[in-house]
Amino acid sequence: MQGIWDEITKGEIMSTSMKDLLEAGVHFGHQTQRWNPKMDKYIYSAKSGIHILDLRITYEAIEKSQDYIQKLVANSGKVLFVGTKPQAQKVIEDQAIRADMPYVNFRWLGGMLTNFKTIIKRVVYLKELMALESSGEINAYTKSERLKIRREIEKLNKSIGGIVNLNKLPDALFVVDLANESTAITEAKKLGIPVIGLADSNVDPEGVEIVIPGNDDAIRSIELITLAIADACLKGSGKRKEVENKENS
């Protein structure tokens, strides 16, 4: 894979415009009394008691994030999408699946990164249960046993279904709402895994390598930023496949 990094031009997949950011309400932060002073440099002004985030910084951060992610994925890296708040759940799942990346959108299990070996055992167990059902072997069980197995599959799918194809620690995290996902960020920091995060005016941005200042409550804002991250993953995958095809031929 040598050389992929250099083949990618900075900002070549940036499709989000300043107008898109405005229309999605990405610039709307929280009420001024709810702000975190550590977000001061990302705030442009205040209007009617609401902090307005600086979209120039947001735009540059998206571009920087895309540049970083596409290079990482081009070199076979994996980005774990994380967003468990109700507004983010469907967007995180849809865009992670589109980008063929792992995700957590229901609940972050403590130790998901720092105790990864144990989590993987649960993933293997889930795969075994799913295989029972897909193969039809489940029909050999009693009705009550089948019901129990299916309930277990449903329960495990909610918590770890998004990481069934993750066989090693992710190379980066993309997080929506730093405050809500503080445990994930703490674990990533302990392991030296870089974090890219959508950060509203009320959060602590420390421990996040690339801060994307933006509204983390509005679905349209979350969707726009997450889509940009997924696009970068797809671009990186495309570059990797190009090089693989060249090497094979």
Image (cartoon, grey):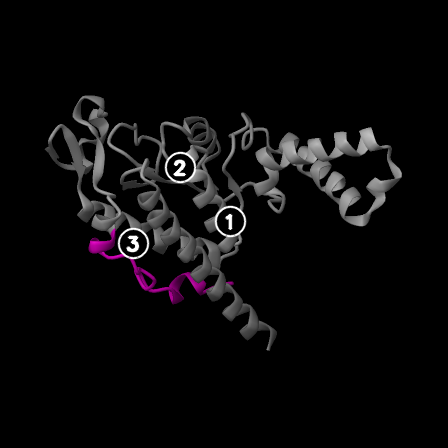
Residue 127's x, y, as percent? 71, 42
Mark 3 or 2: in front is 2
Q: Are marks 1 and 2 in contact (CB under 8 Å)?
A: no
In 3D space, how far apart are the residues under numbered discs 1 and 2 (Cα atoms)? 24 Å
Estimate how packed mark 3 is, as few (under 14), some (14 to 19) or many (20 or more) residues with alpha carbons within 10 Å.
Answer: many
Q: Quadrant of residue 201?
A: top left
Q: Mark 1 vs mark 3: which is more N-terminal? A: 3
* Residue in the picture at 59% in, 78% down: 249
Tell me if residue 83 is in the magenta stretch. Answer: no
View extreme (right): residue = 140
Q: Amino acid at mark 3?
A: Glu
Read off the residue under disc 2.
Answer: 87
Residue 45's x, y, as percent? 11, 36
Q: Amino acid at mark 2?
A: Gln
Between 213 and 155, the one lying in front of the other is 155
Read off the residue under disc 1.
Answer: 78
In 3D space, how far apart are the residues under numbered discs 3 and 2 (Cα atoms)? 24 Å
Magenta residues? 1-20
Q: Tell me, yes or no, if residue 68 can be seen here.
A: no
Q: Amino acid at mark 1?
A: Lys
Read off the residue under disc 3.
Answer: 63
* Residue in the picture at 31% in, 59% down: 14
- Relative horizontal placement of residue 197, taking residue 103 as reference (left or right): left
Q: Tell me, yes or no, if residue 84 can be seen here.
A: yes
Residue 144's x, y, as percent? 81, 29
Q: Mark 3 vs mark 2: which is more N-terminal? A: 3
Tell me if residue 15 is in the magenta stretch. Answer: yes
Q: Mark 1 vs mark 2: which is more N-terminal? A: 1
